[in-house]
Every structure is written in C-alpha cells, then in structure tokens.
Image: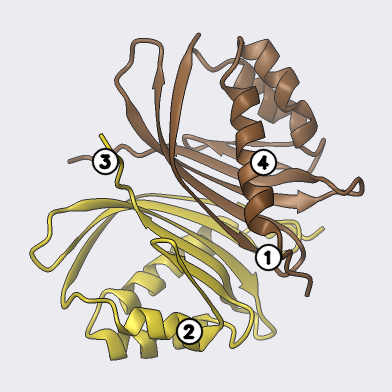
Chain colours: A brown, B yellow
Amino acid sequence: MSFNPDYESVAKAFIQHYYSKFDVGDGMSRAQGLSDLYDPENSYMTFEGQQAKGRDGILQKFTTLGFTKIQRAITVIDSQPLYDGSIQVMVLGQLKTDEDPINPFSQVFILRPNNQGSYFIGNEIFRLDLHNN
Amino acid sequence: MSFNPDYESVAKAFIQHYYSKFDVGDGMSRAQGLSDLYDPENSYMTFEGQQAKGRDGILQKFTTLGFTKIQRAITVIDSQPLYDGSIQVMVLGQLKTDEDPINPFSQVFILRPNNQGSYFIGNEIFRLDLHNN
C-alpha cells in the first residue's frame, strides 16, 4: 500500500497541464503536446465510446478531432489516491467547440507514477453529458 | 500486466448490482446491501466533494442521505481494464430523489479483484452534474 498523500495537488497540476496542451493549436500540435503523457503500449483512452490503446492510437484520435477552436470551463475536480501510488481524477466542466452550443462534459483519468518521479495517463475516459431529456 | 479481457461484462454486471442495492429501501437497508462491496480500510468514496475512507465511514455517509425515494436512468457506461487486473467504470445518468427535479450525474469506480474471484470498490466518486449556466 502506498497511497500518495499529495494526490490532490498532483491532480490539479496535471489537469491544468493536460488542458493547456489539449485546447491550444491544431490537431498536430495537440498530439505533440500530449505525447509524453501516454505509455507507448499500455495507456487506454475512450473518447465518446471509441476506445484506443497505446500512445500512437490515442494521439491519432486526438489529431483528427474535427474542430478548430475549443473553449473550456472546469466546474469541479475530484481526486483520490489508489493503493499502488496511482491517482484517480474526475473532471466535470463545460466546453464549446467552434460555433457549437456549450456542452457539459465528464472526464476521468488514472495517473500512474513513472520511473522519473512524474506521472503518465494509464486510463482516460471522456464523454459529453448528453441525455435524452 | 494482467488486463482483464472481460472488463466490460464485469463492469455492467457490477453497476446493475450496485444500483439495485443503492436505490432500494431506506438508509439502513442501503448500507446493508452495499456493505460487502467496500474494503474495511482501503476503499475511498467521495460524494459531492465529501470524502470517506473505509467501509464504516462510507456506509455511514450512505445511511444518512436525506431522501426516501430515488429513481435512476443510466445513459451510458464506459469501462476499461487497468494493468493490475482492476477495472475502471464511468457512469453517466439521470436521477430524481423524492420531489426534486431530475438531475444528471457522473459516477466513477475502480473495481479491484479480491481473493474470492470477485471485486470490491477501491475508489468511487459521485457528482451531480450541476454547472453555473
């Protein structure tokens, strides 16, 4: 057991870093900015129900997202430590791409410690919060 | 590495079981129904920003939730395997307690394998999706 006592500050710094890379530039610069956050083989990312595994597949998905501008407002960040030193983060917020309406979203990450004293994304799930009524 | 290939079916069965216990009866019966899903010491649960650790603290929180009836509709369940055999599950849905309006919610779980070939909740975060605008 090695619950990280600093999970909350790590989570908040990570989220700030992640969106600063995700929300700027075009698809290629997004992929470049996020590249070192994913493991070449063992990271999972599910975007609106479409799952990718490994850095190349994940970045490929992010490169081809069809918007040119994104604005984002984070509503709340919840985080918890895991028994193995990983950190779980859930983000609720709102985003607006191009001329689309504002949509709420939910996103969750598992941050795993690497050998350099930093973290990579082991698992990530993103969904727009769209319901039938 | 031991990614569980059956993560999706485990996740869906777990969610059905969890809400069948959570949504029925009063606070005491809710706590009894969920009791065996949490580790006595090492489960984390954050409910609307309030964190509890360990079975007793978590069940105490669930016992004292101030509603008598809850109706729930699940919109989507996303799941992924973790490197250690755990499973991450994110649920988006809508719920209605008593005479309150319908609210969307987001909930995430880390299911960890136990020694009996089943799973317990290592980590859980719940939030109503309430934004400023």
Residue B128 versus residue A19 in the image, above or below? below
Which secondary structure, mark 1?
Answer: loop
Label 4 sits on residue: A14
Residue B8 versus residue A107 in the image, above or below? below
- Identity of the amino acid at label 1? Leu
Q: Position of residue A78 (x, y in %)?
A: 51, 54
Q: Residue at position x 47%, y 18% from top?
A: A70
Q: Is residue B5 visible?
A: no
Tags 2 and 4 touching, CB below 8 Å? no
Task: Say which chain tag 2 marks.
Answer: B
Tell us which disc is closer to us: 1 or 2. 2
Task: Say which chain tag 3 marks.
Answer: A
Tell us which disc is closer to us: 1 or 4. 4
- Identity of the amino acid at label 2? Gly
Q: Is residue A105 left or right of residue B119?
A: left
- Identity of the amino acid at label 4? Phe
Q: Which mark is residue B57?
A: 2
Q: Is residue B48 left or right of residue A33?
A: left
Q: Residues within 10 Å of mark 4 (few under 14, many from 20)?
A: some
